[in-house]
Image (tube, grey):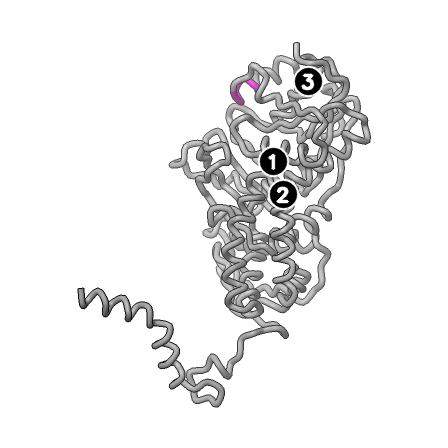
Amino acid sequence: MPKKVKKVVLAYSGGLDTSIMIKWLKDNYGCEVVAYAADVGQESELKGLKEKAIRTGASKIYIEDLKNEFVKDFLFPMIRSGAVYEGQYLLGTSIARPLIAKRQIEIAIKEKADAVAHGATGKGNDQVRFELTFKALAPQIRIIAPWREWELRGREEEIEYARKHNIPIPVSKSKPYSSDRNLWHISYEGGVLEDPWFEPREDMFILSVSPEKAPNHPEYVEIGFESGVPVSVNGKKLAPVKLIQELNRLGGKHGVGRVDIVENRLVGIKSRGVYETPGGTIIYAAHQALETITLDRDTLHYKQMLAPKYAELIYNGQWFTPLREALDAFINHTQKYVSGMVRLKLYKGSCSVVGRRSTHSLYDPKLATFEKDAVYDQKDAEGFINLFGLPIKAEALLRRKK
């Protein structure tokens, strides 16, 4: 028997893993289990969660609406950073985990629990994201990870365990892939998707239509930004959550935001994931376009160098770290003048920037023009090129002599 635990707060989604963990924790630790579910935009997945948790053995359940905090304190900083993991993944699952774990710790302290538990597997990234947050915010609390302890060795055995103990689960052997949904995206992995050659069935997707079934005419959308934060859609100011929802609707309508990738997990395993991020894809494209006219060259280039590191910190669960906070200080300063409007064209799965403007724009038509101007003397370029190219010329002359 493991060391005695009196009360544990379990991060509970109602999915396959956490559905069976309430009973498993009670049986193996003899403890009281308090379930906790974070509402970060799952929508229908939260229906019936309270009744299910209590019916399967939880003493109580917290269902916390964290959507507004999710957008303002996690998504917006990520957007401003430009973070994209391995050039494609917009970090939808990754960025939600530190918020979920943060609130879990707060509840554990409120409940005077001596342990917290999560349903992440021992092969994945989420175990790291949850546990690094736990360690950063409450290093004294015990962490239980059933996937690293129990005798069950896969989803097939989990399903059998659930059936044996009459625990209702949302998956079946005929549909074994798992999904994770929040306001920002939906991810799909596991089961049939573990074969990287397998093309996902169209009925799997929820947020978007296929490009083939998208409207035959493009739709234009204008996004307004203030200091790097999206604040309006088509001239209408929207609250943070509503803004993401509206852009998800528009992007999904036109088949925007689907990616199918094989990524490198922190633990060293390659993993195939399929993601839908329609609104996020639009916002990232717009934000990047606005930065091109509002940031000077050196700041823009340096920020673009830091973005992959910021993405890595999110992906690896290192949100509550001094480095992420230090990077935010730099990023926040760069966003001071990233305000303006971006126009995009949505069509058959594509999202193209077709216009950008800002009162803080550094773009000067008088300098950029190929026509005659009185600002830039093209003869000055000769001296600049001679000086800039001097090291190249000097090396070439010396090598020729040798």
Q: Mark 2, residues whose alpha carbon is within 10 Å: few (<14), some, or many (≥20)?
A: many
- Percent from the top left, x then y, of residue 151? 56, 14
C-alpha span from label 3 to label 2: 28 Å
The quarter of the rendered structure image containing the C terminus is bottom left
Can see residue 321?
yes
* Residue range of the region highlighted in magenta in the rendering: 154-158
Residue type for callout 1: Arg
Q: What is the C-alpha distance between the residues marked 1 and 3?
A: 21 Å
Tell me the SS state at disc 2: loop
Going 76% across and 21% down the picture, which residue do you hit? Answer: 7
Is 69 colored magenta in this rendering?
no
What amino acid is found at the position of numbered circle 2 in the picture? Trp
Front in this rendered view, residue 233 or 269:
269
Q: Main secondary structure of the magenta part?
A: helix
Residue 361 at x, y = what percent? Answer: 58, 73
Q: Answer yes or no: do the residues labelled 2 and 1 have beta carbons within 8 Å?
A: yes
Judged left or right of residue 192, residue 221 is: right
Residue under label 3: 25
Disc number for residue 319: 2
Residue 237, placed above or below residue 321: below
Q: Which residue is mark 1?
A: 129
Report, in whole angstroms, how far the alpha carbon at label 2 lies from the one at label 1: 8 Å
What is the secondary structure assignment of the residue under circle 3?
helix
Left or right relative to 112: residue 133: left
Mark 3 or mark 2, whichever is nearer to me: 2
Q: Amino acid under label 3?
A: Leu
Q: Position of residue 309 (x, y in %)?
A: 53, 48
Q: Is residue 260 above or below residue 148?
A: below
Query: Within 10 Å of the Cα at label 1, are there few (<14), some (14-19), or many (20+) other Cα atoms?
Result: many
